[in-house]
Amino acid sequence: MKTTVTCAILAQTLFIIKKRNMKTFIVLALDTRRAKTDGTYPILLRIIHHGKPSAITTGIYIKEKDWDSKARCIKSSYKGTESVARLNNQLQKKKTEATDIVMKLEEKKTLNSLTAVELKELIEKKPQELSFFSYAETIIAELKKANKIGNARTYQCSLDALKNYRDQRDLSFYELTRSLLEKFETENLAKGNSVNGISVYLRTIRAIYNRAIKAGIVDQESYPFRNFEIKSEKTRKRAISYSAIQRIEKFEPVLGDSLFNCRNYFLISFYLRGISFTDLARLTMGSIADGRINYSRQKEHNPYSIKITPAIQKILDCYIKGKGKEDFIFPIMSKGTPAQQYKRVEWARKRFNKKLKKLAEKCDIDENLTSYVSRHSFASRAKNMGIDVASISELMGHQDLQTTQIYLDSLPSDLLDEIHEKIIQ
């Protein structure tokens, strides 16, 4: 009688789950695909989420004849236990715990954002055992699948740094405490890593944790970044003076010179509102239309439409002859998978930065030239011309003025001297 009642409860629970949540189902099932040597099969907690199945073993094995497939419970004929009712109650408890997790996630409106794998891990493991590393790896895999190779690399580097700190030992969400973050920061500083480099690690770790909270993987109460300040240092200004830009313009190496492309890439980056090297590499002939260059920035996907000035056209003329609409304008990028293209651009950027040092020598520029200098120089040139920060931000496609401020150079010393003299006269 007790067994019958328990089975009825199991069936009723299944009905409730189906009624309340049509996208996620939890049932008890006997996996008859593979028998053990004694002829028994495992009873599984079968989860179907977004139409994708996964299963968690209950640790209980019985023969097929002892399983009631309709009521989804163990029959009273089973002789492998002193109490079939108690065994069914154990199964019911496992299922109820899983159902409770599903219901809570549904109430938080985070259930649908979980993958089947994430939901299984959440049900299968105790909260204190949930792996931060495993969850981070799933995010990295998603970024790669979405062709966000640069972001995936940033996440992987940050994860590797945390793994190295842990000596490759796994880390649960509940072990990731404020104290651990402080020790992680201290150790990296002791190694000589820059404050801003460590800041990238910590901000990435925070982003992963925030995503886990949103997905219902971990509770907000355990948040380790509450009242934890991620330190950063004011970045060294990368802009060069406009007179230095003019010296680069006057330096005109012939085609075939090792600095020919280097000089052109730097200048056109400056002319195109500080276009990044990655976006420059991705420009195709199709980007040119109606006397303008149109593209979306790889980083923020902001659209740009820039008028082709005579200075821009002069550089373009060195590269566009005989090319089709799908061809890349500059000999930086080649066709391939997103991962292959990312590696190609990174390799080309390293070569570009090496050649920029030689370009600086040729043009009597003391500052360190890098692929970022043209973007910072464009912003600083605009500021020194009296253009307001809001307009500069719009030109550069920034989401907020704070981002623009990072790019703006301090006023040059000659302007400061002029202002100083006016003040003390």
Image (cartoon, grey):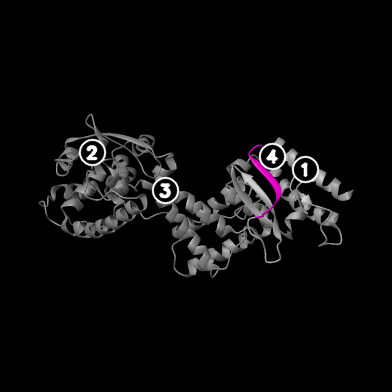
- Kindly indicate whether the residue at mark 4 contacts the one at mark 3 (C-beta within 8 angstroms): no
Q: Locate residue 211 relative to residue 367 in the image: left or right.
A: right
Nearest to viewer (mark 4 / mark 1): 1
| Label 3 neighbour load within 10 Å: few <14, some 14-19, many 20+ | some
Q: Which residue is mark 4?
A: 107
Q: Which residue is mark 3?
A: 148
At 40% from the left edge and 51% from the top edge, which residue is drawn? Answer: 149
Q: Which residue is mark 1?
A: 11
Q: Residue farthest to the left?
A: 254
Q: Which residue is mark 2?
A: 285
Sequence-first tag of 4 and 2: 4
For label 4, the SS is helix
Image quarter hosting the C terminus: top left
Asked if residue 363 can be seen in this view, the reply is yes
Q: CA distance from mark 4 to mark 1?
A: 23 Å
At 34% from the left edge and 52% from the top edge, which residue is drawn? Answer: 342
| Label 1 neighbour load within 10 Å: few <14, some 14-19, many 20+ | some
Q: Position of residue 98 (x, y in %)?
A: 71, 49
Q: Locate residue 132 relative to residue 317 in the image: left or right.
A: right
Task: Determine the image quadrant of residue 131.
Answer: bottom right
For label 2, the SS is helix
Sequence-first tag of 3 and 2: 3
Work out whether residue 389 or residue 170 is closer to the camera in this orientation and state it. 170
- The answer to whether residue 191 is magenta is no
Prevailing secondary structure of the magenta residues: strand
Q: Which residues are magenta?
A: 22-32
